[in-house]
Image: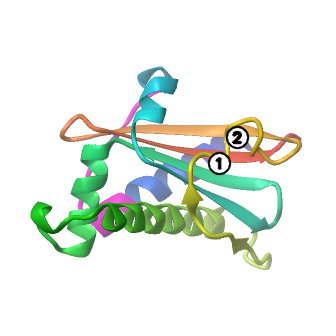
Amino acid sequence: MGSDRETILKKAVMDTLESMAFVSLTEKTTAFFSDEMLSSGPQRSLPVIKPEGYGFVISMSSALIRETAANILGIGPEEMTAENETDALSEILNTIAGNFMREYISPDTTYELGLPEAGSLSSKERLPEGSKIVVDCPFESETGEYLVVQLLGKLN
């Protein structure tokens, strides 16, 4: 089951970044990233309301978020604001989560996503009780920047 989740999440991430922001990604191993790397760039988290006990976290280098935000919004670097970057990162995470949930859960099951928020659900005090990080999906862009999406889930 875990490999299915990983495969579906990787596809959701790659398809989303390619279609929304015209950014091509290369899969990396978890050895590619460190805690310092994850905390150095912007992070957004998104809880899954239904079925409960799940969540998503996205961490992206500052340079990659600027590039993707500019592509999504169709604006130049001189017009970029911190709010544009935050909005773009939230929209990317929301799209990834929606694509994942549509593919992963059965078609007759409804799902409900929460609102993206700053920071990571993976910190111990915010991790849903009985949950853990079940999938880490690190990527590198053509320009050498990083993106990591994590799926949090119930311990089974």
Residue at image point 18% right, 74% down: 74
Relative to 51, 70 lies left or right: left
Relative to 81, 51 lies left or right: right
Residue linked to disc 2 = 2
Query: Would you call the spot at circle 2 few (<14 residues within 10 Å), some (14-19), or many (20 or more)?
Result: few
Instruction: Determine if the magenta segment contains residue 18.
Output: yes
Residue linked to disc 1 = 5
Extent of the magenta region: 16-29
Residue 98 location, x and y as percent? Answer: 58, 69
Looking at the rendered structure, the secondary structure element under dot 1 is helix
| Residues marked 2 and 1 touching at CB (< 8 Å) | yes
Looking at the rendered structure, the secondary structure element under dot 2 is helix
Residue 119 location, x and y as percent? Answer: 56, 48
Residue at image point 55% right, 47% down: 7
The amino acid pointed to by label 2 is: Gly
Residue 73 location, x and y as percent? Answer: 25, 74
